[in-house]
Amino acid sequence: MALLGASLTTCGYFAKHRDESPLLARVGARELHVSEVGDLVPVGTPTADSLAILRNYVTRWAREASVMNQAAFAVAEAEDIDRLVEDYRSSLQRHRLEEQVIASEVDTVVAAAVIADVYGQMEANLEAPHQLVRAFVLKAPAQHPRVDELRAAWQASSDELVTPQLRQLAQEVASLALLDARRWYEAPELELALPTAPGDIPTGSRVIEDGDAVYLVKVFESVRRGAKAPLPYLEPRLRKMVLEQRRAAYLETYINKVYNDALERDEVKIYVGSNP
């Protein structure tokens, strides 16, 4: 870039600026100089290519500068930019402070007993948004040489027990394996994975053969839409709610302490309603 700048300056391609940095472009009061583009062009690039790279960059800069000039003109009369910038700066500083305080002082571990207690006390906003099912689902290629072994292991597994053999075969044979006995699924989730028409998913065990795939399904429990959702399904939401409450409570305490400390240092002066 230095070589390019020197050659262009020598041939008078750019006008000289008073700071002796070659001027690349000007849009209104905005100026772009060689010193600002840094190592834009790799050393050894042919002159023609260097000029093309530089010209594209300068054109993009000029377009952006034109927009910024228009923005400055359009907004100048309508809004106090300095005030907006200061408000944003203050908000950012406060946010950073709150994040630091929360990270160092708020316990982020929520015990299962706490979540269960919140679940037991809440009455509203716990309705299931869809039918919920607790189920095992396996999908395997119908022509896989070990698909019969997978079927046998599936049938030999009683209820919610996943035998080591079934888990191993699921890893080796199945293209989809949902084997978490605690996991609740929304019905639309499973409908996307199963070759069945939308509708309530029945409880019980079944085998679905559909062309090139075999589906092994066991539905242990089902909760209808609008009923109270089970705790494991709501657990992530309840944990987040508990943490937000902790953060809000601690921040309120922290803000009060900061304010009281400022009062004690006689830094706070409130003149509203006071005698002059």
Image (cartoon, helix red, strand yellow):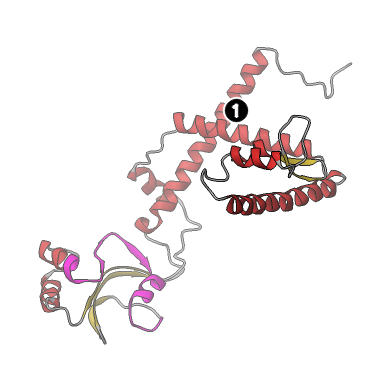
| Label 1 secondary element | helix
| Image position, residue 246 (x, y; %) | 48, 37
What residue type is disc 1 on?
A: Ile
| Image position, residue 91 (x, y; %) | 65, 36
User: Which residue sits at x=38%, y=52%?
Assistant: 235
| Image position, residue 195 (x, y; %) | 33, 82
**Residue topped by disc 1:** 255
Q: Looking at this view, is 31 or 184 the one in front? A: 31
Q: Would residue 159 be visible to someone looking at this image?
A: no
Q: Looking at this view, is 143 or 255 the one in front? A: 143
Q: Would residue 60 be visible to someone looking at this image?
A: yes
**Is-magenta flag for residue 171?**
yes
Q: Is 112 located above or below residue 56 in the figure?
A: above
User: Which residue sits at x=60%, y=26%?
Assistant: 256
Magenta region, residue range: 170-198
User: Which residue sits at x=40%, y=52%?
Assistant: 236
Q: Looking at this view, is 30 or 48 the one in front? A: 48
In terms of image quadrants, where is residue 112?
Answer: top left
